[in-house]
Image (spheres, helix red, strand yellow):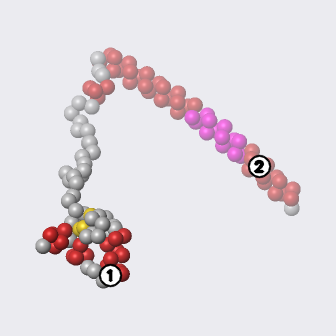
Amino acid sequence: MTTNLQNLLEQKAALERQQRAIQDQLDVIRNKDRIEAIARIKSLMAEHGLTVPDLFVGEKIKRYKPHPSAGRRVPPKYRDPLTGATWTGRGQQPRWIKDAIANDGKTLESFTIAQQAQ
């Protein structure tokens, strides 16, 4: 039984070596083809007086455009009357709001800055 397992492991190792050798040969061929293609492209460009920017004339290049409101600061909507901490109302609620709502029975509206000014 162990000899069969050893034979299979040896065959597997031999096949893996053969696979690596074939892959290496493919890589050499691909690199050679790539080098030849680049040489042909360079000679055609030189023959016709072209530059790299000439290849992209008339094509629109898509550029990333940030959202119009990206980077703008948002004024705070809520304030803790005890500490003066503020929150814009975006993202997760701060701990001081969560604790006050859960423990003190307050509502989110009770922290609104406009309501506190009255």
x, y percent for residue 105: 30, 83
Q: What residue type is labelled 1?
A: Asp
Residue shown at 20% from the left, 59% from the top = 75
Chain-order first, disc 2 or disc 1: 2
Q: Is residue 90 among what the camera can see?
A: no
Dot 2 corresponds to which residue?
Answer: 11
x, y percent for residue 38: 43, 25
Residue shown at 78% from the left, 52% from the top = 9
Label 1 Cα crowd, 10 Å radius (few <14 / some 14-19 / many 20+): few
x, y percent for residue 2: 86, 59
Dot 1 corresponds to which residue?
Answer: 104
Q: Quarter of the image for the C terminus: give it.
A: bottom left
Residue shown at 23% from the left, 30% from the top = 57
Side of 102 relative to 32 (left or right) = left
> Is 23 inside the magenta-drawn segment?
yes
Residue furthest to the front:
82
- Judged by its main secondary structure, the magenta piece is helix
Side of 43 relative to 64 (left or right) = right
Q: In this view, does 48 lie above or below 64?
A: above
Q: What residue type is labelled 2?
A: Gln
Which is closer to the viewer, label 2 or label 1? 1
Q: In this view, does 28 lie above or below 74?
A: above
Question: Magenta segment range?
Answer: 15-27
- Who is closer to the viewer here, 50 or 63? 63
Side of 40 relative to 26 (left or right) = left
Label 2 Cα crowd, 10 Å radius (few <14 / some 14-19 / many 20+): few
Residue shown at 58% from the left, 31% from the top = 28
Look at the numbered disc 2 and give the secondary structure of its residue. helix
